[in-house]
Amino acid sequence: MMAHKKHIYFFQSGKAAGSAKMKNLLGGKGANLAEMCNLGIPVPAGFTISTEACVYYLNNNRKWPAGLKEEIGKNLSRLEKVMNARLGDSKQPLLLSIRSGSRASMPGMMDTVLNLGLNNTTIKALVKLTGNERFAYDAYRRFIQMFSNVVTGLDGALFETELKAMKKRKKAALDTDLDAAALKELCESYKKIYKKKTGSPFPQNIGKQMEMAINAVFASWNNQRAIDYRKLYNIPADWGTAVNIQSMVFGNFGEDSGTGVAFTRDPSTGANSFFGEFLVNAQGEDVVAGIRTPLSVDGMEAVFPQATRDLRKIARKLENHYRDMLDLEFTVQQKKLYMLQARVGKRTAAAAIKIAVDLVKAKKITKKTAILRIEPTQLDQLLHKTIDPKAKLNVITAGLPASPGAAVGKMIFTPEEAIRMAAKGEPTILVRYETSPEDLSGMAASNGILTVHGGMTSHAAVVARGMGKCCISGAGDIKLDENNKTFIVGRTAISKYTWITLDGSTGRVILGKADLVQPELSEDFMTLMKWADSVRTLEVMANADTPHDAALARKFGAKGIGLCRTEHMFFAKERILAVREMILAENKSGRAKALKKLLPMQREDFKGILKAMAGLPVTIRLLDPPLHEFLPHTETAVEKVAHEMHALVGDVKKRVETLSESNPMLGHRGCRLGVTFTDLYEMQARAIFEAAADLLKKKIDVRPEVMIPLVGTPEELKICREMVEETARKVQKRKHIKFPVIVGTMIELPRAALVADKIAAHADFFSFGTNDLTQTTLGVSRDDSGRFLPAYVEKGIYPYDPFVSIDEEGVGALMRTATKAGRSARKGLKIGICGEHGGDPQSVTFCHKLRLNYVSCSPYRIPIARLAAAHAALNHPRKS
Amino acid sequence: MMAHKKHIYFFQSGKAAGSAKMKNLLGGKGANLAEMCNLGIPVPAGFTISTEACVYYLNNNRKWPAGLKEEIGKNLSRLEKVMNARLGDSKQPLLLSIRSGSRASMPGMMDTVLNLGLNNTTIKALVKLTGNERFAYDAYRRFIQMFSNVVTGLDGALFETELKAMKKRKKAALDTDLDAAALKELCESYKKIYKKKTGSPFPQNIGKQMEMAINAVFASWNNQRAIDYRKLYNIPADWGTAVNIQSMVFGNFGEDSGTGVAFTRDPSTGANSFFGEFLVNAQGEDVVAGIRTPLSVDGMEAVFPQATRDLRKIARKLENHYRDMLDLEFTVQQKKLYMLQARVGKRTAAAAIKIAVDLVKAKKITKKTAILRIEPTQLDQLLHKTIDPKAKLNVITAGLPASPGAAVGKMIFTPEEAIRMAAKGEPTILVRYETSPEDLSGMAASNGILTVHGGMTSHAAVVARGMGKCCISGAGDIKLDENNKTFIVGRTAISKYTWITLDGSTGRVILGKADLVQPELSEDFMTLMKWADSVRTLEVMANADTPHDAALARKFGAKGIGLCRTEHMFFAKERILAVREMILAENKSGRAKALKKLLPMQREDFKGILKAMAGLPVTIRLLDPPLHEFLPHTETAVEKVAHEMHALVGDVKKRVETLSESNPMLGHRGCRLGVTFTDLYEMQARAIFEAAADLLKKKIDVRPEVMIPLVGTPEELKICREMVEETARKVQKRKHIKFPVIVGTMIELPRAALVADKIAAHADFFSFGTNDLTQTTLGVSRDDSGRFLPAYVEKGIYPYDPFVSIDEEGVGALMRTATKAGRSARKGLKIGICGEHGGDPQSVTFCHKLRLNYVSCSPYRIPIARLAAAHAALNHPRKS
């Protein structure tokens, strides 16, 4: 017979079976307790049941693994020996805390039971032993409540009500005002409640208590709170939690005791100053609960000078040992300090950067470690305005945090109004059911966007992120009443022009004007980004359609524009008329007239953006959306357009009908427009090259590259390429200047990926359009996915939203095929990605592993992409 | 220096440089002339310029390949020697015919010049030589006209006008009534026209005449007629044409001469009886032109007994030699027979089958040859009613031949009316702008469907083909005026209830009731299909949704149902209400109520279809389309439905709005419905298994298989499969009977193909849904593709419509991946195809090469698929 697997790791100050390296097995808390013991730091002795035991328990119909029971017995005996006390002993009873602790920190998500070991016998011993009846009954009433709630699942309110009633009867303001008699009485009432609700008396068998508590901690891995938290932070469901069984020390022993938390540096700013809070005569959760105001570390020093000096010394020792800022929990029992927890502390992005850079300067960590310590997505916080953390907020509802930052403005309902009010300098929040390309100028004019419908990748979300504008989407509790110009949340009706504030980083919708805090890019930020740039191999480009965005992108470190969408230029007020004229034209000559009007406008657009990116490549994508997107859709809008165009309403309507499509995403768009209406793409190519020629003549180093969208066959690209080259030749001849003509294509259809070798024959570069590639590969319309995709992610059908991070198994397989085929046909072919995924760290890592040349993303995502690319390079070094 | 390539092949009765095997080089005509010479058949001597010379000429800026000129000179000399006459000679002038002849027969598409060699000198020699002045000038005037028209490009009408004027002046009824003087005068007028129009006199240099004629034939390969023809029959543009230069014989020499065409068997019925038409005193094109009524072969025998006997003998000899029915051209000059052409004759499908079977019986060909001689698509003719070929038709417009057959009925505009009139037994033709799933019962009730919009794969086309019902789609010249209940074509308004006839095999729309001919499946057809079945390795299944279709499919040889769509059952009058109730239900319990109503209906559906297919598998696909397809869309329809359902109009409207999608094709449908509304699929599974259990208890051998649509991930299939299995277990327990539970999936998304190995773990079979797979892989919506796909096929971007034949490069690559991955994970996995492509011979061949197990197609395509599968097996034998 095989020996049983070891499930339990003992620890006591000075030596422990585990260490900080054994986080997976012992959980963060258990591993760090062991580590502290090994460092000789005072930690109450105990033992940790491994996560494996928990996983076994959960997978095997709530049965313990073989040998666990015996191991617990053995370790308990050892603990009793160390503590010179025995569980259930009527003289020297041992009391225990039983706490969860998983591989990743999940604060407050799982269960804890303190003071275990009390019953009607041991309570008497405790009174005698401590000579402190009040303390003993306080511990007992806490234990009964906690056990009943956590282990048995009774409602905690049952006990709180009883406590309140007792305080009222005794005219006690605080819990600490209740005397021993009152607490003793409370224990009796609590036990009665327990019996009434469960049908059994409160368990007196302490072995049974412990077994039940261990099982409760195991089971708490799968409580709803924990499941939700794991989903939010992408923590695998199969990790399980460890159980830490530790002898109790008491911060509530009396005025010579207390409990506290501390950070080795300031978690908000990163400043190198010890920071902590301490509560006298209190136990664990009292500090967090915020019932009484805690002391600062300095305040603590005045009361407990030795313990505080010890704490400072230990903190310094631990920080030097862990080489990172730590979050500590400690208890002082009768003036003696015990450390209960040490872990790497959570911090703001700004603090994270400062700490990392400071530690490099202090030669505690390497630059590589510093880079890897900053989560790329955290940087978002640094780039946008945020709500002042000190502000009091009236949150009325919440939606999806679609585009980060915060915005304050008067609520309005139409893009026209946003434009009108922007002209008067009035800030607005545009509220829509959902947005469409027609709303674009209104969106640009507003300070923030709130939509009732749509997900993280809805039109509003994508456009807002591109604009670096705050947006909340899918705020489904809002009932929009566009006619009455109000919206209703619950029973509150909010009318037009009311001030509201959006927190795009959390999704909160706030009534009134909240105070905002301006972001600033610190010296440390610049330093860290420089280090990141020096290690990454992926280039980072920007998705930018305007000179303003181009300038912003440069500031954020873009090395060119990877996607300049020309359609956004078509929506501007003075353009849209000409665009519509072109669409409504009956024939080529009518179209030619309209295109002639558009040519100089587009040329100026391109001049602006090329100039802003002088010295760097600008990848200009020719028109992509179906033409009907430029036409009005409502009855009234059709009438208005007809009037503006001096056209018949019937004619406009008919054209709109003719052009409408059942599945526009798969319709007459992209290069299909270029192939069927060659004059349209020709005009765009001409505008690009004329702009370039004019600037080159002025000695401005501009580098346009033409990108053809929605290619599915080599022939399409060939036809478009020939047209672009011919147009370039004509411009070169007319303007008497030579320039290189670079033409590439988007790879955004499965077929394009499958025939990438043949397409490469006509392409100077590939750019993966992963938005469309995801839609077609998965057969999922981004706009319609809201009805099932959230359920799909919840059920684990997709491990994450494939519109946020690249679906590596499906879409990624096609990208791999295309990259290999493209480069096999054309050695060293430049390949990048310009879908929304280009700014997503997980996707950036995938692109790095695929050996792409660059990612392109919206300006505000550029620092994130740079850092993510650095992480990828460090974690997955390229072999050759 | 290398010797020049040989470009010219000489032939004369008794021996020839070429043979029938050299069709690619000599064209069909040239190769067969050579073959006849080799058989010793009387053929006027001549030589053939190869297709390679033509290709060179067209690719090299209209220059002849090196050496061609010299070769022509040499062969001409040889011909002059054989014929004892010389080109341009003033005593014994040689006259030539110059004819095109490509690898594939393209009758009348390219150019021919007869009587070349005449000029003002040789005409006199011809008069003297023949002693027949009338004949000579008749030949000359024909030559001038033909040369001017074919070689110089002058309008033939110029000469016809002149001829008519002359006949009027001379009071001649027929051309043959004109005397020599008149014809001589006509030659002079013709030459004047030539000079006036071209600025040069009619060419007198006969060498020059010949060179110009050869070039004209070369160039005619690229005339518009020929290009269009090639496109229609998929003939490659780079084949080129050969040029046959042959000494003239004259059917117009006088009453002892004539010309004719013949078939060795009847091309309409296949009957083994010699069939021909002969015209006395006529040249080539006169027979085809139909100016005079020709004689039958028997009639000819009375006038030219020897020549007719020779003809019969030669015909027999040739048929025995070629082992196929031949189409012959011949001329009798002064009672002597000359053969001018022999080729395998075109024939109807019925004739093709009869001839092939007869030749096998006569041991002339093998069964394999017989099978390969029948084009699978031809069979369509045999399965549907057709318009009596003798009927006089008033064709008013034409559309796409979307679903073959013919139908006569009264024109109506609404599906409701079709149902109403069908109830009274009145035949109708349903005319719609385009159809939608709501029109389904109306479509079923009508005799034929005509749509103004949509292509060969529009909703109307697909559904009609599935129903085996005649349909013409995309008849774009029709202006539909649904309100006034008329439609207008050109200046004709046709009102409701007018009788019209549709010819779904050609796309013709005919005013009035045309006579139809009933199809019948002949003994020979059955024999041939039996032979085909014995060689094919692919199984053929049916797409069928009703017991009626199932029975039809069995009759046509289906080995089960590969796709039974359950949604069609949902549209029936009494169901749709319950379906809508289900969709409009606010919650699970409301849905449960509606589903309970649907359960017994679906159970009966399945009983019917399972019974009709007893002994064979029936693959039932669970609900696929998005729910909004079942809801009304117009204002009026919404009101009606709300009324029927006792629901508020506003509520129905809101639900319709909520469910509407931007890209329904990529929306909330297929297994996404099953995963999110599990009760719906559960009801369907229960209906299937309850139906099966009831029938099995009655000892009826039913074999349902459940197919899950739109799977993109293994998890989706796993979830659905578990639900189906659980439902089956419950039914088995309740009904006390065991049966196998078979669950498979459609592979119709690129992602499914990419992760097919993982999907195979949960699948008992795969069925490629190539309609959706094509849409997603190419990113092309079938419904919207009409705006660019035709242009794409025309430009060669796609070599053919990818919705008709599988896009092997793109979609096919994914099918290959999925087949390989699926079978690597699950050895011997059953894989088929159930998209529209399953009935397309080219796609069937591809499926055979992929080693699929079966194709599934609509009942009327089954014989086609069986024969195509046999062709594939013979042409691409499986190695192992």
Image (cartoon, coloured by chain):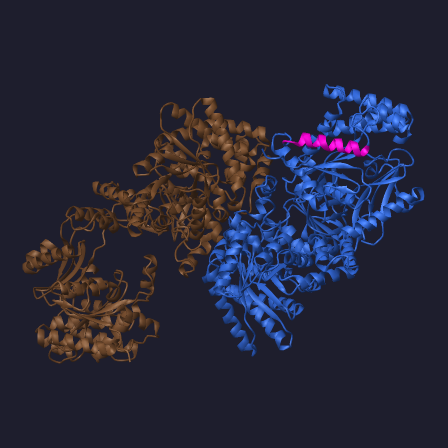
Chain colours: A blue, B brown
Picture quadrant where residue B791 is located: bottom left
Of B38 and A413, which appears nearest the observer?
B38
Of A526 and A471, which appears nearest the observer?
A526
Q: Position of residue A184 (x, y in %)?
A: 86, 23
Considering the whole magenta stretch, tell me its main secondary structure.
helix
**Image quadrant containing the N terminus of chain B:** bottom left
Q: Is residue A72 magenta?
A: yes
| Total numbered badges shown on the rendered structure | 0
Does residue A587 appear anywhere in the picture? no
Of B807 and B148, which appears nearest the observer?
B807
Does residue B828 appear anywhere in the picture? yes
Q: Position of residue A222 (x, y in %)?
A: 66, 35
Q: Is residue A206 above or below residue A657?
A: above
Of B804 and B469, which appears nearest the observer?
B804
Q: Position of residue A217 (x, y in %)?
A: 71, 33
Q: Is residue A20 above or below residue B317?
A: above
Seen as rendered, the residue at the extreme right is: A302
Q: Position of residue A102 (x, y in %)?
A: 70, 40
- The magenta stretch spans which residues? A66-83
Q: Is residue A813 left or right of residue A397?
A: left
Q: Is residue B769 magenta?
A: no
Picture quadrant where residue B183 is located: bottom left
Seen as rendered, the residue at the extreme front is: A1
